[in-house]
Each structure stands twice: as structure tokens, then as C-alpha cells.
Amino acid sequence: MASPDMTISQYKQFRPKGIVLIMLLGLTVLVVFVPALWGAYGRILLITTLLYITMALSYDVVGGLLGYIYLGHGVFFGLGAYVTSLALGRGQTLPVSLTLAACLALSVAALLGLPLIRLRGPVFALATLGLLLLGSQLASNMSSWTGGAAGLSLPPNPSPKLTYALTLVLALATILTHWQLRVSRLGLKLVTVREDEDMAESVGIDASKAKRLALIISAIPVALAGGLQAREISFVIPTEAFGLEHSLAPLLMCMLFKPGTTWGPLLGAVFLTAAQEFIWTTLPHFRLSLYGILLIIIGTQRARRP
């Protein structure tokens, strides 16, 4: 028979995982049954929420665990949207199209990581913002592939249930991946680099490799989110796919509560979705003003911290 101390120790180790599993189970039940009760509106709202959860937690890998202000997250969202749309337009299935988007996002993130890992602080933030602007310009100018400023249009979604199911699977996989990453060796390395990069390198941590892996891990889920949104709305244009909103929204969702945790960005995603939905139905012209207000609040609160 196991000793009482052993039982208590095992319980303490299981408790955090048990809480997360219960939350995931509750989320799964919620998103499976709500569309049946709310119809098309409920499905669209939940898809938006699930995509935001994916974007927030994938951003947190760089913005929370690594602690970098990262304004290029929307680059991979737009890349995923365009690759998925192009593949669908050439007769590929949605799963195949999303796989292509994920593979290209991985490759691009690995290449971009080579120069970006050398940068720190505001220089890193400005460089990633420049990539977002570059992506929008390339999508507008490569009209033979992207349709130019007019963008690409897709036939109506033939299987909304498949899109919804894939969005749910993506969100759940991102939550579990983030949770495991936080307690993994790589997660501990990222946190150490965040606290003091020079000290981390002095104790044998390859900070460049850790940052590059963080960028790659962050890029794949958001690229898939971009592809799923493109399939859901059946069109993609440069100003939307590479819009600043897709970089600011994840930053806000991550920073609103507690960056570097799994529950913080998740809760931020739910909050921002609800706030945006309220503004859309009451003051639609002030939707983007919400981002400015939240940025001021977050900046003020962070400035007050010792």
C-alpha cells in the first residue's frame, strides 16, 4: 500500500494537469453543442473565439515565454490564408491545403529566424512589423498569384462542419502544446532567456537556437488559423490577411492577463472576442479604437510595475 505522503505528492502533481483536462473537456462539450443551439451565428462566433485562442497562445510562445514584443505574427496568418486559398482554388482538399500552409510557414519561419534571432528589444519589434508591411505589399503586387489588391475569392464553403471541427482540433492542440511547452526543457530555456539572455548563454543555453525554435513553433498554428479563416469567409485580400489587427490582437490577448501562462492568453482571447462582438453590435465604427484603449491600459499598468 502506498504511503499517505506518496498519495498527496501524486495528487499535487496531477492536480494542475487535471484542471487543464477538465477545462479542455468543458470547452469541447461547449463548442460541440452550442452551434446546435445557436445555429449559424453561434458557429461563427465560436470559430472566431477558437481562432483567437489559437492566435493568442501561439503568440505567447514568443511574446510571453520568450518575452519579446512581436509584431510580425500576422505575417504567418496572411501566409496561411493565401497558401490555403491558392491550394483550394487548384482543387486540393482543405486538410491538404492546410498541410501545405503549415509546411511553408515552418520553412519561412526557419529562414526569417536566422536574421531575427540576432535582434533584441525595440529593434526586434520594428523588424517584425516591417515584415508584416512587406507581406502586404508582396501580396498586392504579385497579382498573377494573389489577385492583387482585389484578392482571391473561393466558392462557398461546401463543408462548414469540417471547417468547424478542424478549428476546434487546432485550438485544443494549441492549448495542449502550449501547456506542455511551458514545462518542457525548451520552455524553461525560453523563460531563462527572457529573464537574462546574457546569463542564459553563460550557463550553456543556446539562446539563438531557442529563439529560432520559438519562432517556428509560434508560426505554424497561426498559419493554420489564417487558412481556416480564409476557408470560412471564402475570400482573402492583402489588407485583411496581412492587416495590423492580426498582430495587435494576439499581443493584446496575451498581455491582458498573465503572459507566459496557458490560461492568461486563453482568457484574453475569450475577453477580446466578447468585447469585439459587443462593439460590433453597438458601436461598429469604434471597433479598432478598442485596440488603442487596451494598449494604453496595458502600457500604463506595465509602466507601474517595479
Image (spheres, rainbow, N blue to C red):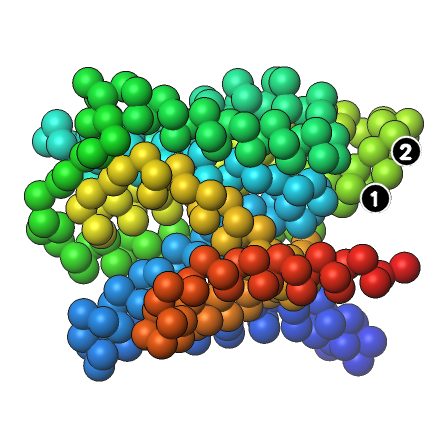
Residue linked to disc 1: 195
Q: Secondary structure at mark 2?
A: helix
Q: Residue 137 in the image: x percent, y percent?
A: 38, 25
248 is higher (above) or lower (below) than 37: above
The picture quadrant where one finds residue 143 is: top left
Whether residue 209 appears in this view of the structure is no
Task: Residue under label 2, please give it.
Answer: 199
Q: Is residue 249 visible?
A: yes
Question: Whole-percent x and y of residue 24?
Answer: 47, 68
| Above-or-below relation of 13 to 252 | below
- Other residues around mark 2 within 10 Å, as few (<14) / some (14–19) / many (≥20): few
Rounded to the nearest angstrom, the CA distance separating label 2 from label 1 is 9 Å
Residue at x 74%, y 61% (from the top left corner): 300
Q: In this picture, is 105 found above or below 267? A: above
Amino acid residing under circle 1: Glu
Which amino acid does the dot numbered 2 rest on?
Answer: Met
When the figure is inspected, residue 145 is found, relative to residue 60, above or below; the finding is: above
